[in-house]
Amino acid sequence: MTVYELTGLFLISTVAAEPLVTKVTAKTLVGIAMILLMIILTSRLSLINRITPWFEHTPTILITKGKIDYRALKGSFLSLNQFQGLLRQKGYDKISDIEYAILEPQGELSVFSKPQERPLRVGDLGINTREDGLTLPLVMDGKIIRSNLRHLNLNTRWLMEELRKQGVTNYKEQILLAEINASNQLSVFWK
């Protein structure tokens, strides 16, 4: 949610509460409609590349090659204490372990550790692995997700047979979630 959308929500709640005091609902409805129109307009305008910088901030690099950019930190209205708190939330207690830290336009902090501080990955060991693939839901809250069945070239008859094998007699009443992994193994979570 952008700052403009959040501001719009506050304005709408203020305008919507006006009839409680003045008993004039027509003006309230016009006010709410105008605010909604402005929120939609700013959302659409923010999609235009030349106008985007007016509505959104650009990412701010706060740490570059392990060095804190004090001006960028102050320009982002962050104290060093707040910044350290954000880094701890990301799992970094030592600033010296960080190569780059970027404050994203949405307010999130992206942190990239130095190569020697990054977690070990399977690829670092030279071990070949197979792709896990995508796990897709086939039944959610008792409703069949037909688009996922089509995507997997499966049909409802196949799904019903697999559910019967797992003891399901009435999927609408019994199943909260049924999902299939890349190995075509169906997992059923009961209500």
Image: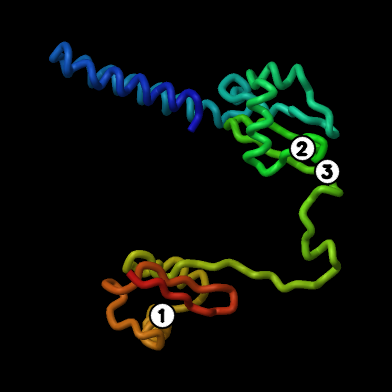
Classify 147 as above or below 67. below
Callout 3 secondary element: loop
Classify 78 as above or below 144. above
Pointer 3 residue: 114
- Categorize mark 3 by other alpha carbons within 10 Å: few (<14), some (14-19), many (20+): some
| First along the sequence among labels 2 and 1 | 2
In three-dimensional space, the C-alpha distance between marks 2 and 3, rounded to whole angstroms, equals 11 Å
- Residue beneath the point at 59% across and 31% down: 107
**Left or right of 98: which side holds 142?**
left
Q: Are marks 1 and 3 in contact (CB under 8 Å)?
A: no
- Foreground disc of the pair 1, 3: 3
Classify 69 as above or below 175. above
Callout 2 secondary element: loop
Question: Picture coordinates of residue 153 (x, y %)?
Answer: 51, 76
Q: Are marks 2 and 3 in contact (CB under 8 Å)?
A: no
Q: Quadrant of residue 119?
A: bottom right
Which numbered marker is on residue 15? none
**What amino acid is found at the position of numbered circle 1 in the picture?**
Leu
Pointer 1 residue: 159
